Image (cartoon, helix red, strand yellow):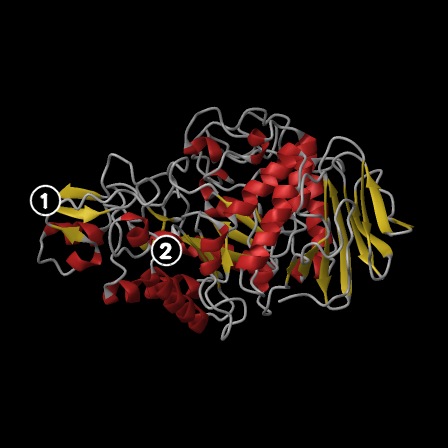
Amino acid sequence: MTRSRSSRFLPLLALSACISSTPTGHEPGSLPPVELAAPAGPEWYRHAVFYEVFVRSFQDSNGDGKGDLPGLISRLDYLNDGDPSTTTDLGVDALWLMPVFASPSYHGYDVTDYERIHPDYGTNEDFERLCAEAHRRGMRVILDLVINHTSSQHPWFVDAASSPGSAKRDWYLWSDTDLGWRPPWDLYAKGSTWHELNGAYYYGVFWGGMPDLNMQTPAVREEIKRIASFWLGKGADGFRLDAARYLIETGAGVQGQADTPETHAFWKEFSAYVRGVKPDAVLVGESWTTTPIIATYYGTTAQVPGGDELPLNFNFPMAEELMGAARSSDGNGLALKLAEMRSRYPAGVADAPFLTNHDHVRVATQLSGDKARLSTAAALLLTLQGSPFLYYGEEVGMANGTTNNDEAKRTPMAWDASASGGFTSGSPWFSLSPGHEGTNVAAQTKDPGSLLSRYRSLIHARHASDALSRGGLRLLTSTQGRSPTVAFLRVLGDERVLVVHNLTDDAQTAGPFELEGEPAEVLFGDAGVGSPVRNGSGWSVTLPARATGLWRLR
């Protein structure tokens, strides 16, 4: 969503025994191996690479300074040209569109019409054409579905607020008095989540302009299902679910406003409905919280492989560890997070790792534009298990804008070095990020050493290996103490891929690892990365500063 995150959220089946590891400094048998099973189920989204797009900032087609769906269509070949043999496209498998429904705001998280594309972006027919063109290239399209709340300007709310006897009154939550609940992410906040209007109070957990829908009203539940079916029928392949933790409230405090049993029950009901309409449609949950709580949003795996609630859930704690590893040159936090996932996540679920999204300060700004660290972050993300998500512009190292607001995280895409960055023939709706003259697609697309080329190569390597794209993960790095390298094995069936990352600014030797088999084929290797060598206690590999190597074993 678009809101301050600084105070809102808390800080944040086994594989076959084909390998044993004895990394340097780790005593064999001191801890159980950290293994994450391959995602269960054949669905496309369990191994896809997703790309998050803010349509307003991606490509303008008509010169009004705002990105739109026709503009996005014109750039699809950059994302995936539909030809697996080429390497000039990014190679992503799916697009996540931030809100595109009618809304009074620039960001769209306060919807006024769930069945109409925002006029700034085009028409419903443009959306259908986008889906058709994306599908023709082998890409899927998912929509941001914001159903925790609507805009206070939505006709439903205007009707509900008009009279206590309105037929829509129970579509929202009302009280005769201010119940004084504080936001569940800040119980010491001064403001209440109840807002006065026409002599009564309505509940809006984020602010008064976003009144919460009452999802315990059967008519609301059925309307939300109908809306989902409407867009699935127009070509959408699923939905990203905003504020998934806060859907149904039962009382004050964290216990009554977040992660309630009623919220989980609705998501299971909604997930079953969506599967019934389009069996391979995906639901991606936004639950910005701790690993144990995120794990609960997968539901149970007894009847539905991969979980009967939300089949993908953004891994916010892992994002912190990925960025931390790239920044600090220490992989211990990442290793510990994988171990926690092993103990908390249901077996066989697909993770949804990412570096940043539209609510974060961009990767390049967090890492001070350091290309080596940006390269490390990309390699870590794109070699993990599950379905990684990229944020538009991340692949070229776009920085934040210069203002201290959310718009600065969502600036127009830099396609070239021109004043408007190739984004528009008019005046951009918001200033491009600083340094776009050198940080843009045109400057990097033919440079084999660029960050864009690295993203392309890593994604294509991922697609070239079932173990990398669909497999499980066995950690080779110790969880005990500082680690300048991170190593793991990706496994699916008989295919095994050794992955080793050097997180530091100096050459490092990783290992020894006792592998069943030997490295035979280089799937990806940075300049200067040699082949693993056998010594008395296993295989070791020396990598230059900030380098990554991927080897298929035989």
Q: Nearer the viewer, residue 199 or 230?
A: 199
**Looking at the rendered structure, which numbered label has been put on residue 277?**
none
Residue appearing at x 20%, y 54% in the figure: 173
Front disc: 1 or 2: 2
Task: Name the kind of residue labelled 2 in the image.
Answer: Asp
Residue appearing at x 66%, y 62% in the figure: 470
Residue 172, percent from left and from top? 21, 54
Position of 30 with respect to 258 (left or right) is right
**Looking at the rendered structure, which numbered label has been put on residue 259?**
2
Question: Which quadrant is the C terminus positioned in?
Answer: bottom right
For residue 158, above or below residue 418: below
Question: Which quadrant is the N terminus positioned in?
Answer: top left
Q: Are marks 1 and 2 in contact (CB under 8 Å)?
A: no
Task: Name the kind of residue labelled 1 in the image.
Answer: Asn
Residue 199, percent from left and from top? 8, 44
Q: Nearer the viewer, residue 49 or 320?
A: 320
Q: Residues within 10 Å of mark 1 (few under 14, many from 20)?
A: few
Q: Residues within 10 Å of mark 2 (few under 14, many from 20)?
A: many
- Is residue 441 among the parts visible in the rendering? no
Residue designated by label 1: 198
Considering the numbered disc 1 on the image, is that residue within a helix, a strand or a loop?
A: loop
Q: Nearer the viewer, residue 224 or 333?
A: 333
| CA distance separating discs 1 and 2 | 31 Å
For residue 177, above or below residue 400: below
Q: Residue furthest bottom?
A: 303
Q: Nearer the viewer, residue 538 or 533?
A: 538
